Amino acid sequence: MERTLILVKPDAMQRGLAGEILSRFERRGLRIIGLRLLQVDDALAKRHYGMHEGKPFFDGLVSYICASPIIAAVLEGTNAINAARQTMGATNPVQAAPGTIRGDLGIEIGRNLVHGSDAPESAEREIGLFFGDGGLAPWERSIDRWVFE
């Protein structure tokens, strides 16, 4: 099982799209094993976007992710990173395929609704930033093995 971090960004939260976005990942077959509603502060934003420090758009990224509460989610599943990224679509919503989150709901590249980890190493780092060593509830068994009375 692979894990990925998903952030439902401020533009999605302000537009009331959080449920729609999370449901698309679930319909894809990914399981939510961690979920937090939080207000990102400058320190967390700068750690999250640290690889972009010094670039002209860095300050804009930091202020944007701090603009309103966001949802941080950890998803788990087979090839979770690639599956989530395909579900999100291209970073630029104009180039994102119809049927993807960004293709159907996105407006502009600077407000592209959702973030997803791009590799196992970044997923591990990002999950650590947003969830520390706790807050995850991995599924112990699949639904087909549950007994309903």
Image (cartoon, rainbow, N blue to C red):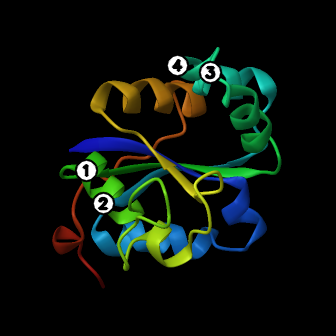
Which of label 2 and label 3 is nearer to you? 3
Q: Which residue is mark 1?
A: 82
Would you say 41 lies left or right of 130 here?
right
Q: Which residue is mark 3?
A: 55
Kind of residue sitting beneath label 2: Gln
Q: Residue 51, which numbered label?
A: 4
Q: Residues within 10 Å of mark 2 (few under 14, many from 20)?
A: some
Residue 71: % across, % down: 64, 53
Residue 141: % across, % down: 23, 57
Which residue lies at the image location 35% right of the left edge and 38% below the top edge? Answer: 118
Q: Nearer the viewer, residue 48 or 2?
A: 48
The answer for how far apart the CA atoms under marks 1 and 2 are is 6 Å
Q: Residues within 10 Å of mark 1 (few under 14, many from 20)?
A: some
Q: Residues within 10 Å of mark 3 (few under 14, many from 20)?
A: few
Residue 55 shows in this picture = yes
CB of mark 1 within 8 Å of CB of mark 2? yes
Q: Secondary structure at mark 2?
A: helix
Q: Is residue 83 above or below residue 46?
A: below
